[in-house]
Image: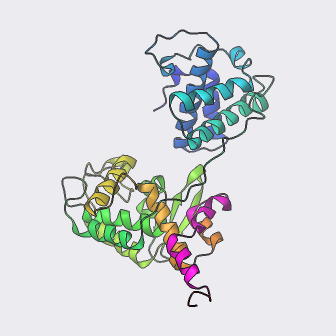
Amino acid sequence: MIIRENNPYFLNDFLDYSATILNKSPNTIKEYNYDISHFLKFIKWNFNMVKLSGDEDIKSIKISDLEISTIAQIKLEDIHAFLAYLKQNYRSKPATLARKTASIRVFFHYLCNKTKKIPLNPAQDLESPKLDRRLPKYLTLEQSKKLLQTALTNKQGHGNHDNRQRDYAIITLFLNCGMRLSELVGINIKDIDFSNLKLNVIGKGNKERTIYLNKACIDAIRKYIEVRPKEEIKFNSKDALFLSERKERISNRTVQGIVKEQLKLAGIDQTKFSVHKLRHTAATLMYKYGHVDIRALQELLGHESISTTEIYTHVDNEQIRAAVESNPLAKQ
């Protein structure tokens, strides 16, 4: 939750601009607020505008009194110092630093280029940290089948009631469609076209896209709807497909808990896999076994850049071994 009273006016103006003109999602607005407020707290400390005791963290610094004149004094070196501070004190990973960098870059673009609140943009030449290109973790086909079977048959699932049909439908959609957590939570029943076997979801940047559903998905959804609560549903959740035991739209945290518990029950190390890893699994299985075209996979996953999708074109050890065995000299 964003407490606007804790922000300087120009940060709130930026958040309003991002929400309305840039049409950023609520989650992105929260990230902007967190990243920029953290940065501004560092600036007050770095500019010696506030003193901290030995055990105090810069997150405790008040920034609502910051003036735009202070922001105009920020240089590129100050931004680099902030990123270095994060890496040293919080052990922030390159992906986290890259997100902070992106937030700072759009913030200063707004202040300098859009509203002329400051004369120069210190982030104009700000580079993004180089990211490690690691292969995505994913479940094997056998593990995926085991996870689905566990979700459908084990009564020890998430909650105090028998939620097998709900949990099975959630796992099925993740493993078959590769959708994001926020996309699944946001599904409304009216978004599902049972006749044409598809549904519309709202992805990153509030962009709507169509996801096509196979028979497994349609069957799982239908069976869940049969047992889905019909009465006493919270008013603002009546349209939601997936409901919690409190009869309101299921939350991100609850879905994460469901996936974690089902992984554990299936005998899979839940510390190594997460909801997002199920998205990786769906994409990898489609590419590996379905021979899906990379452009089609990009469209299905809702990636803006093909380079993001290309991480799923990796080859695994099994494929490497098969390539060696196929060498015509292998039998010599």
Q: Is residue 182 magenta?
A: no
Residue at the limit of the structure toward the right, as seen here = 119
Query: Within the image, what quadrant is residue 229 found in?
Result: bottom left
Q: Which residues are magenta?
A: 301-327
* In the image, residue 323 above or below residue 259: below
Residue at the limit of the structure toward the front, as seen here = 332
Number of numbered discs visible in the structure rendering: 0
Camera-nearest residue between 167 and 85: 85
**Does residue 212 show up?**
no
Query: Which quadrant is the N terminus positioned in?
Result: top left
Q: Give the image's coloring scheme.
A: rainbow
* In the image, residue 325 above or below residue 20: below
* In the image, residue 234 above or below residue 191: above
Query: Residue 155, how many percent across, how many down?
Result: 19, 63
Query: Residue 215, how many percent across, how many down?
Result: 41, 78
Name the residue rendered at 24%, 58% in the picture: 157
Name the residue rendered at 52%, 63% in the picture: 200
Q: Is residue 212 left or right of residue 230?
A: right
Query: Within the image, what quadrant is residue 102 found in?
Result: top right
Camera-nearest residue between 189 and 271: 271
Q: Is residue 325 magenta?
A: yes
Q: Is residue 104 left or right of residue 137?
A: right
Name the residue rendered at 52%, 67% in the picture: 283
Dominant SS of magenta comes to helix
Query: Which quadrant is the C terminus positioned in?
Result: bottom right
Camera-nearest residue between 327 and 88: 327
Query: Residue 277, how many percent across, how many down?
Result: 45, 58
Query: Residue 307, how many percent across, how many down?
Result: 67, 60
**Does residue 296 show up?**
yes
Q: Is residue 293 left or right of residue 108?
A: left
Name the residue rendered at 62%, 44% in the picture: 23
